[in-house]
Amino acid sequence: MHVDDTISADQALRLINRGTNLYWKGDYHNAKQLLSALARRLPTNRTAPFKAQRRAQAERTRILNALLIPLTNHQVPLRRAPDVSAACAEAYGPPTGNRWVPLRELLGVIGAHQLRLRGVHVPALGDRIHPHYTVFAPTRSEYADLVAEHPLPPGARTAFDIGTGTGVLAAILARRGIPRVLATDNNPRAVECARENLHRLRLTAEVLHTDLFPPGRADLIVCNPPWIPAKPLTPLDHAVYDENSRMLRDFLRTAREHLQPRGEVWLILSDLAEHLGLRTGHELLTLIHTGGLRVAGQQDVTPRHGRARTGETTTLWKLQGF
């Protein structure tokens, strides 16, 4: 249904709840105001059980994504619309003519473009990392600090960074002087992002598009997998949510096969899943042991960012084969 500036938020919400998509024909800024008004009518309950929160979030996403705006060759043909061509090219690729996109998605695309331009300062690097669209930004810097500070295995010459994302951990390992660093990711956007960041930082590391491990063995294998074992709802969720702990399980099941005899695995993981009741500490230790690994040490840090849970801890688990 085509709508414009004359529709109220209550009218819009009633139409959406009946299964109607709203195709916006009015002023761009008024569309943003309508989206904000819809969001205010969908309160979030952060004290509810996790599964209830996820159901509510999925419903919230469905409702807010029902407000669509036109794109014509990566331009928004609406009054007072900004130039979004660069942001859309990064997210969607070459222009493909006319299409409708959720305004909420487009705002995410614009925000990702702006973050990519300014970058994220990573204290452990003393420099900025520039994330691409759908690639997790290293705004939680404590996990980078752990990799920058933990003692390297004696004589380490080769390191793997599994699920590299922006390449931040590969960059830290290269800057720490490991002669050969190989980073992998199964997301093509992440591979491109990591390569660009490493090139910008003038650091030498190879980035491969593959699921989990590159060929060969390493003295050090580092992995910072998604921390929450739940189903992703959006493309941006994949860096945070790992349904059924698939990546974590596969990584721990096969890591020893790619480890030099006296090598180390560094698994960086928050205990957020335990706080949410999605995994127990015993389950994690069982996965480690089942993969033929043992805990040889750990280093804990308390997250400093504003969204951390009370009592949450991020841990670098140092694992070795037995």
Image: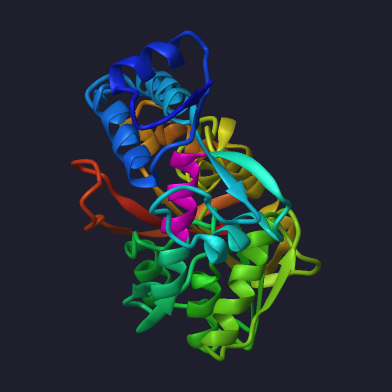
Residue 5 image position (x, y, % from top left): 35, 32
Q: Is residue 88 above or below residue 169?
A: above
Residue at horizontal 37%, vertical 54%?
315
Viewer-nearest residue: 278 or 216: 278
Res 207 quadrant in image = bottom right
Residue 235 image position (x, y, % from top left): 57, 43
* Residue located farthest toward the top when viewing the structure as drawn: 18
Left or right position of 24 against 247: left
Residue 126 image position (x, y, % from top left): 35, 84
Which region is colored magenta? 102-112
Q: Is residue 213 above or below residue 128?
A: above
Residue at horizontal 60%, vertical 85%?
199
17 magenta-colored? no
Viewer-nearest residue: 107 or 259: 107
Residue 274 image position (x, y, % from top left): 36, 33
104 magenta-colored? yes
Q: Is residue 201 above or below residue 207?
A: below
Res 190 quadrant in image = bottom right
